[in-house]
Structures are given as C-alpha cells and as structure tokens.
Amino acid sequence: MRLKFMLIHMMLLMVIMGGCDVNVPDTQAFQDEFTSEFMQSTSETEEGYYTFESGTGGYTMLFPIEGQIDDATYYNQNDFNEIFTFGVRNEKDNLAYGFKLTYEDRGTTERIDTYLKILSNRVNYDGEYNIFKQNNKTYYYAKREIKASNAYFIFGYIKADNDKKGIEFISNISCLDNDKYCEIEIKSEEEKIKKIMTSIEFK
C-alpha cells in the first residue's frame, strides 16, 4: 500500500509540475532559459514588452517579448559593471534588431564628454548629440544611417542626475536576410528604440 501511495504521489507531482509549463508564455524571452531569468514577470508590462531587471539590481527597462539575450556575451563585475547584448528577429518584415547595453555604477560616469567620445568611436559617429531630460535622467541621443548596407545605428548615453549610474545604449536595425529586400521606416523604428531607451529606470 505504501508503494502504491508513493507512486500516486509521484504521478500527482509530475502532473502539477507539467501544468506549470502551461503558464510559461510562448515568447522568445521566456522560451530562452537564460533570458527568462531577467524578466520580472510572465505578464506583459505593456503590449509587446516585459520588464527586464538588471542582474546588478541597478535598473529596469522594457524588453521586447521576442528578444533573446546572448548568454555568451553577458558580463557582470561585482554589480557595478554589466555588459550584455540581445537581439530581436522579425521574419515577417525581414528585419533584425541588435542591442548592446553597458551599465556602470561608479564615479567615472560623471565624465560625460569622455563617455560620449568612446560611444562615438564605437559607432563611427562624428556628429552632435540631442540632449534631453526625463525622470531624473539625462539622455544624450543620436542616430546614424549606413546607406551602403541599408542599416541604422540608434544610440545614446543615459546618466542618472542624482547618482553615479550610467548606461551606454547602442542599437542597430538592418535586414535580417541581406539577399532579400527590407524596408526600414526609420521614424517608427526610432520611436520603438526610444521607447525602450526612455523606459530605463535606475534603482
């Protein structure tokens, strides 16, 4: 009888555990085990976005439901420096989105001119930055078109006004398959990128 009871108990556990999988969203962010670790909830914060929480605990931001973090590039140094990349594939429109974020929580982030120079060098940009403030943060924002490959860089630096936290934010948009045509409506795409960028909240 005891053996029979144990077998029934084990079967019930398997059913319960199997049932949990039903609640996992069928989105790239949750189907990828590493990416899902950074999502605050299985519920969408806004349509098409979850809330990402940094492994440092230093900030949150909106994260596309079809985004996937590259675990091979993830780096976290004692919670004061975090670097990671993630991508989103849009098969329907033949578009690929790439993102790279570098977070720092140290006094050197006050040297904005130095950080902007480094950022400009990374994306081969020689123009000025649009500066605006929002929710106790200062944004240094710009974009660059790469006509030869029908691609765009949208990038910036986000600095906490009352803290030493800062984030270098680089994104790019290009054709997913370069052998096929893709149309990049830069105004609407820029709005999407800005939505993610301005959703950053330092903690």
Image (tube, grey):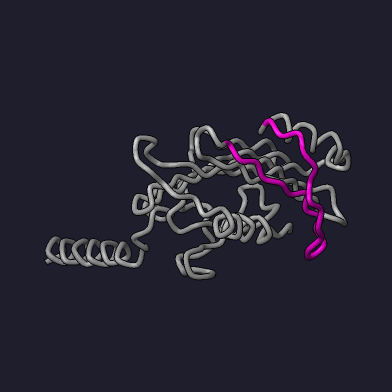
Q: Quadrant of residue 168?
A: top right
Q: Position of residue 81 (x, y in %)?
A: 70, 39
- Rendered residue at 47%/69% (across/down): 43
Camera-nearest residue between 33 and 44: 44
Q: How many marks?
A: 0
Left/right placement of residue 101 relative to residue 87 reads right
Q: Position of residue 123 (x, y in %)?
A: 66, 33
Left/right placement of residue 194 relative to residue 18 reads right
- Rendered residue at 55%/60% (across/down): 188
Left/right placement of residue 133 relative to residue 74 reads right
- Magenta stretch contains residue 158: no
Camera-nearest residue between 18 and 38: 38
Question: Does 121 sit above or below residue 154?
Answer: above
Question: Does 12 sit above or below residue 95?
Answer: below
- Rendered residue at 61%/48% (across/down): 55
Q: Quadrant of residue 162?
A: bottom right
The secondary structure that dominates the magenta segment is strand
- Rendered residue at 41%/56% (across/down): 30
Which quarter shows the N terminus? Answer: bottom left
Q: Position of residue 180 (x, y in %)?
A: 34, 40
Q: Position of residue 17 (x, y in %)?
A: 29, 62
Which quarter shows the C terminus? Answer: bottom right
Q: Residue furthest front?
A: 147
What stretch of residues is rendered in magenta?
124-146
Question: Does 149 sit above or below residue 184?
Answer: above
- Magenta stretch contains residue 139: yes
Left/right placement of residue 201 relative to residue 6 reads right
